[in-house]
Every structure is written in C-alpha cells, then in structure tokens.
Image (spheres, rainbow, N blue to C red):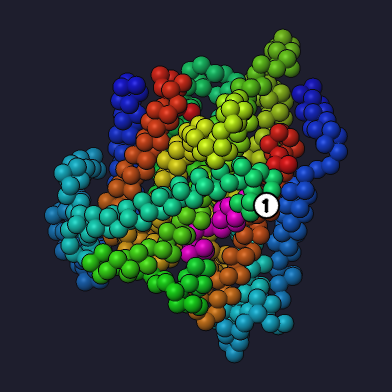
Amino acid sequence: MTGYVVQRLGAVMFIMVAMSVLVFLATHALPSNAAALILGQYATPETQAALEHKLGFDQPLPVQYWHWASRMLQGDMGQSFEMERPVAPILWDAFGRSAILAVSSMAVVSTLGLALGVIAAVWRGRWPDHAASIFTYFGVSLPEFYWGLVFILLFGSTFHLLPSSGYANLSDGLAAFVSHLVLPVATLTLTLLAHVTRLTRSSMMEALDSMYVKVARARGLPERLVILRHALRNALIPSITVLAQDFGFLIGGIVAVETVFAYPGLGRMLVGSLERQDLPMMQAAILVLTGVYCLANLTADLLYGVVNPRIRYGGSVG
Amino acid sequence: MAVRLAELTAADFIRRRRRLPASLIVGGTIVAALIVTAALAQWIAPYPYDQMHVRDRFQPPNLHYLAGTDEYGRDVFSRLLIGSQLSLVLGATATLISMAVGVPLGLIAGYRRGVTDEAIMRVLDVMLAFPPIMLVLLILAVTPPSLLKTAIAIGVLAVAPIARVTRSVTLDLMSGEFIEAARARGEHLHYMLLRELLPNVWPVLMVEASLRVVFAVLLGAVLSFLGFGVQPPAADWGLMISNGRAFVDTAPWISLAPGIAMSITVIAISLVGDGLREVLDPKVGGR
C-alpha cells in the first residue's frame, strides 16, 4: 500500500510539473507579451525593452522558467496586471468561495444521488425508477450554464425567490449566504447527479439479487433493514469512488457555473484572466485548479484501494 | 472471414430479439432528421442567419419568426438551423479525430501487449491525468479561435478513453479462434488489425462514439459560451445562449430556443448509444 501511495504521489508531482511547463510555455506563445500588456498603449520601444529586462524576459526560457517556478513554490504568485495587486491573496479568497460551492454541491449530489439510486433499484421497472432515469437523462442532456440560465429565469427573474447572481459573506447573515448558494449548487447538482444515481442503481440491483440479501430476507429481517444495512452497505463501494471522480468533473462545471451566476470564485477568476490576458493570475488559477484536480483523482484512486482490498497491491489502477 | 463472423453475430442478435430497441428507432429517426435538416439548413431557413430586421427586434415567437427574433432582429429559428450545422460538424469532427488516433493506439496496444502496451497505456494515463477543461481553455485562450481548433482540442481529450475501450475489447478478442486461425495462416500485422480485429471492435466503438459526440457538442457549447470557441456573429448554439443571457428577463426565447435544440440533439444521440448497447448486450437493457 505504501509503495502504491508513493507511486501515485510521484505521478501527481509529475503532472504538476508538466502542467506548469505547459502554462509557462503557453503564456510565452501569447500574441502580445507581458511587458506590452503592462505598459498599455503608451509603450515606447525603450520603456518596453527596459521593462522586459526588469521582468527578466531577455533571459533564456529555461532560466525564466526556473525563476518563475521557484517563486511559485514559495507562494509568490506575482502581481496581477489588471488589479496591480499581488495575486496570492485574491486567489486564495476566490479559492475559498469556490470550495464552499464545491463542498456543498458534493454534499447534495452524494445524498440525493444515493437516495435516488436506491429508490430506483428498489422500485425497479416501476414509476419511481422511470422518474429517476428521466430526471437524470435531462440533467446530462444540457450543459451546466444552460440549466443555470433556466434557474435564473425561473427563480430569479420570474418569481423573485432567490438572488440570481453574486455571493454574500457569512457576516451578511446566514439567510443571504445560503440563498446565494442555492441556485449554483442546484445547477451543479443537476449535471452531476446522473453518474452517481445510475451507478448506485446498478450496484444496488446487483446487491439486492445477491445471496446475502436473500439470506437476510429469509431470516425475516424487516425490508428496510435489509435494504439499508445489507444491500446499501455493499453497494456503496463503487458509489464512493465515482463520487471522488465526480469531484474532478465538478471543477470543470464550476468554471461555467460561476460565470453564469457571477459567483466570485476561482473559475470565474480563471475565465476573466484568460479574457484579459492577465498572465500571473491565469497561471496561478490554472495551477491551483490542476492541483485540486490531481488531488481529487488521487483520493479517488486511494479510496478505491481502501474500500476494495482486492486491488490494493496491484501495480496500477485501470 | 472476420467480417462475415461479425455480421453473423449482429444478425443473430437482431433475429433473436426480433425487433430493435425503441430507443434506437426513436433516437435514430431524430438523428437522421437532424442531419437532413442541418444539411438543407440554407434552403429551409426562412431568412439568412445574419439578416437584421431592425424594426422587428425582440419579437416573441410568432408566425413570421417561428422562434422569435434577437436583439438585432435576427430570426432565431434560422439561426438555430444554421447552428445545427456547427454543432453536428463539431461533434463529428472531434469524434473522428479522437477515433483516428485512439483506435489504432488501442488496437496495437491490445494486439502487441508487453512493452508496446505498457508504453502506450502510460502515455494515455498521463493524458487522462490532466484536468480536461484547463487544457482546452489554455490552448484556445492563447491562440486565435476557430471551429477546427476547437474540434481538435476536444478531440484530443477523447483519445485516451477511446484507446482504452479499444484495447480492452481487443484483449478480449485475442483469445478468439479466428485470431489463432489468422496467426496460423501467417497474416501480416495490418491484416490482423484492420481485417480481423477492427470489424469486431467496431460495434463497441459505435457506442463509445455516440457518447463522445454528445460530450463534444456539450463541451463545444460551454467553450463558445465562455467566449473561447466559435466567435460572433456565427450562429453557434452556445454563443446564442450566451448572447441571450443579457435579455433573459425580457426575451427568454433567445437563450431558451437553442437550449431546447441542443437537448433534443443530445438526447437523440444518447438514445442511439443506449439502443446500440442494448443490441450488443441484451443484458444491459432496462426491461
């Protein structure tokens, strides 16, 4: 197990280094260079050359990468071109807000997904099963941003029930804080739900057909206990790992959802910095999101090994 | 030989089940209709997609403008029709790109096994480990946008999953007698891959391809929504939804209509995929 963990950690390190090289090279492939962007329209060739020298752009690429990467590792993410403030505090604030969104969405997705999956399996072939499958079919048939828009239209502008954009701090009151989260969380949930629900349904059906469930029923246990204690406990294993994988998808979804709801998180920061070519901001956002993605995948792999001992000593996970 | 074998089994399945699954028939009909509409869009569309009817801005759906008009007075229905071309072309191109790269890789990995397999699979693992949307955003943000580039970026993302599926099916097939027979005949590598393995992998790949087209259409919409895909004034669905966002209170049809078109497309393609899967493996079928 230890060897496996070390190997997986090594893989994460490798991906991070590779991504940092990619991000670094990509920013150098940009049509306009950073010095010109900082100076704006009043740049003269002389001032531009002076700034390029100051920023170290006249040095060879590997040297530049080395300086940049070592500063990043020390937590110095540079200055935002647009806001002319250090990137790090802005980024960590946005990260915190995205984390709130991500964690609450995952909580809803796992509760609702497991419940729907169990219901669909227990009443298989009957209306609750069909209802669950139609519901999840619709959820994945449209991208997140569209559902976001529909929700805004329904709950924000038509009935004025919920705020359709922005974010409120906890200090603004619990009601404001929660109400700003409802629509983004609902949107993310709708698009992520199908995966967990379908998987829980099929593993629950398998468990319900198994010998140990038959035995439990034969012993005369109440059906509720049979379903929750005996079947669900065994069916949970694949669901847990798929939830960890979904966390990776969530990161992609968050970029679109934060844009729709003008939610000031990391995803919106990334899109904004890409649009305005705010290089330090963009580099930092991409690297942090990549790091989170890798850690989520790592957790998924390790969880899989923990809950399914058969593969624990296998070399790699498929 | 292998070709005939594959046809035989497929025919067997159909005969045994007597009828095709409803999902395949319904989905297939809608997909066919969509393709015909997209192909004839220029002639079906009542107005040119970029013609502005300045006096008829923000018209709700009516007999003249079936899906209403947008903020420039452009006919939303005509734009939907032209937009279907972009979506279908993007989905098809991206999927073709990923199949063209992924299928050969998977076939070779499964056929050769050993070091070749190991090397190919490790490279694919690395590709899978990158957060997909970051990579695409990075590529599209630093280079000028175009439909082909979006298709390539999305296509590259799907190479690894397609290669994996191909490999696992190939590994299963390798124990078949027809492979042994072909080996005994001393067939060449390309014959083994193209004439023996590929026809048998093909049905499973069709299911995978339908998933990938859906994925490409949706991701393409997200990218143009975020402003990194197809650029205005193109009648792309994602772009139309994004433009309509500002008027969602007063003229919701500008955003809603392309969304409905997209969901019909996506559901129809998913139905085809589900139906194909059911034909291939009757156990999977719901009922």
* Residue B158 locus on image (x, y percent): 53, 42
Whether A59 is drawn above or below B80: the answer is above
**Observer able to see residue B143:** no
Q: Quadrant of residue B85?
A: bottom right
Residue hosting label 1: A127
**Chain for mark 1?**
A
* Residue A148 locus on image (x, y percent): 48, 64
The residue at the far top in this view is B184
The residue lying toward the viewer, choosing from B66 and A193, is A193
Q: Quadrant of the N terminus of chain B?
A: top right
Q: Amino acid at mark 1?
A: Trp
* Residue B54 locus on image (x, y percent): 58, 87
The residue drawn where x is 23% and y is 67% is A171
The residue drawn where x is 84% and y is 42% is B19
The residue at the far bottom in this view is B55
Say whether residue A134 is magenta: yes
Say whether residue A106 is magenta: no
Whether B79 is drawn above or below B121: the answer is below
**Observer able to see residue A139:** yes
The residue drawn where x is 33% and y is 26% is A5
Q: For the magenta stretch, what is the residue range?
A: A133-148
B267 left or right of A144 in image = right
